[in-house]
């Protein structure tokens, strides 16, 4: 759908939009994402406020999604800040002080990650049955392999087995969510570094998750 620029624009069509994830743009500029969880609920108003703020009238899921994106970005900034503190300190502090700082920063990072995961689970529970619920689940961070495991082969196998642990394969609305393609690209990069037959097995395991063993 498209329309010329006006201060107020109404987009209509006879057919409903398929349920899923959309991106709304003005010319070449991305304006906001749009979730349609139920094709019967497509009558709503979007207001673009000053400083790029977006507000949906009669569509609370999309307001929650925008708030969700902002909160996740905040968690990511906090993690980046902790990592930057360590990087800067590594250039000046002696090793004994650096180890102490690292232990302290790891505790802070763990708390942030736990808070982020709890937040994502809460959003998923509050929006059960909606697209936002599965987006929140998919955004969860998988656990890292044991720090004591040094085998590159094992690490590759671990990530290919778990990258899609939180993806809802039975929800076609997730198909065009941008971070899905990011995850597929990450999976592909790992596959390219694996040796046969591990690479083929990893692909088969993912297909089994997606379609079920009987459909392959």
Image (spheres, helix red, strand yellow):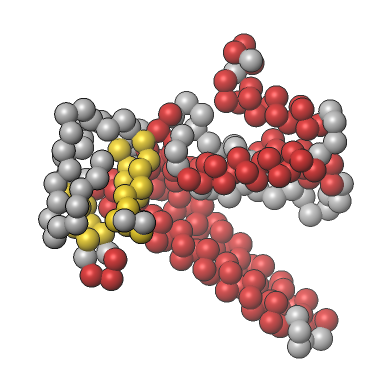
Q: Please state the horizontal and vertical placement of residue 140, each as a whole percent of the image.
A: 53, 48
If the image is split into quadrants, where does the C terminus sit? top right
- Asked whether the viewer can see residue 128, the reply is no
Across the whole image, how many numbered discs are drawn on residues? 0
Identify the image quadrant of residue 28: bottom left
Please name the residue shown 76% across and 40% down the image: 192
Q: Is residue 61 above or below residue 27?
A: above
Pick the front one: 184 or 92? 184
Residue ranking furthest to the top: 214
Q: State the image coordinates of residue 197 (x, y, percent, origin top left).
A: 84, 28
| Residue at 44% across, 29% down | 171
Say which quadrant the N terminus sits in.
top left
Q: Nearer the viewer, residue 28 or 159?
A: 28
Q: Quadrant of residue 109?
A: bottom right
* Image location of residue 36, percent across then percent down: 30, 38
Q: In this rendering, would 144 be left or right of 76?
A: right
Viewer-proximal residue among 167 and 215: 215
- Residue 44: image quadrant is top left
Give percent across and percent down for residue 115.
Answer: 50, 59
Please name the residue shown 52% across and 63% down the image.
76
Which residue is painted at 84% across and 47% down in the image? 152
The answer to whether residue 159 is above or below residue 50 is: above
Query: On the picture, is 132 further left or further right than 44?
Result: right
Q: Residue 159 vs residue 183: left or right?
A: right
* Residue 30 drawn above or below residue 77: above
Q: Is residue 160 visible?
A: yes
């Amino acid at each position: 759908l498209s329309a010329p620029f006006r201060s107020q624009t109404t987009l209509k069509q006879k057919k409903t939009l398929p349920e899923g994830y959309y991106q709304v743009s003005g010319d070449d500029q991305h304006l906001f994402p749009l979730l349609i969880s139920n094709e019967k609920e497509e009558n709503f108003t979007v207001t673009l406020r000053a400083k790029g703020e977006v507000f949906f009238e009669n569509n609370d899921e999309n307001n929650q999604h925008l708030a969700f994106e902002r909160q996740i970005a905040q968690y990511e900034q906090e993690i980046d800040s902790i990592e930057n503190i360590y990087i800067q300190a590594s250039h000046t502090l002696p090793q004994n002080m650096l180890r102490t700082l690292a232990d302290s920063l790891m505790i802070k990072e763990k708390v942030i990650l736990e808070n982020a995961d709890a937040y994502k689970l809460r959003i998923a529970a509050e929006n059960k049955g909606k697209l936002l619920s599965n987006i929140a689940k998919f955004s969860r961070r998988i656990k890292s392999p044991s720090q004591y495991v040094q085998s590159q082969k094992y690490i590759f196998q671990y990530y290919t087995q778990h990258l899609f642990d939180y993806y809802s394969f039975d929800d076609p609305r997730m198909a065009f969510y941008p971070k899905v393609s990011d995850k597929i690209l990450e999976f592909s990069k790992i596959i390219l570094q694996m040796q046969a037959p591990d690479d083929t097995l990893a692909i088969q395991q993912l297909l089994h998750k997606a379609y079920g063993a009987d459909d392959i």
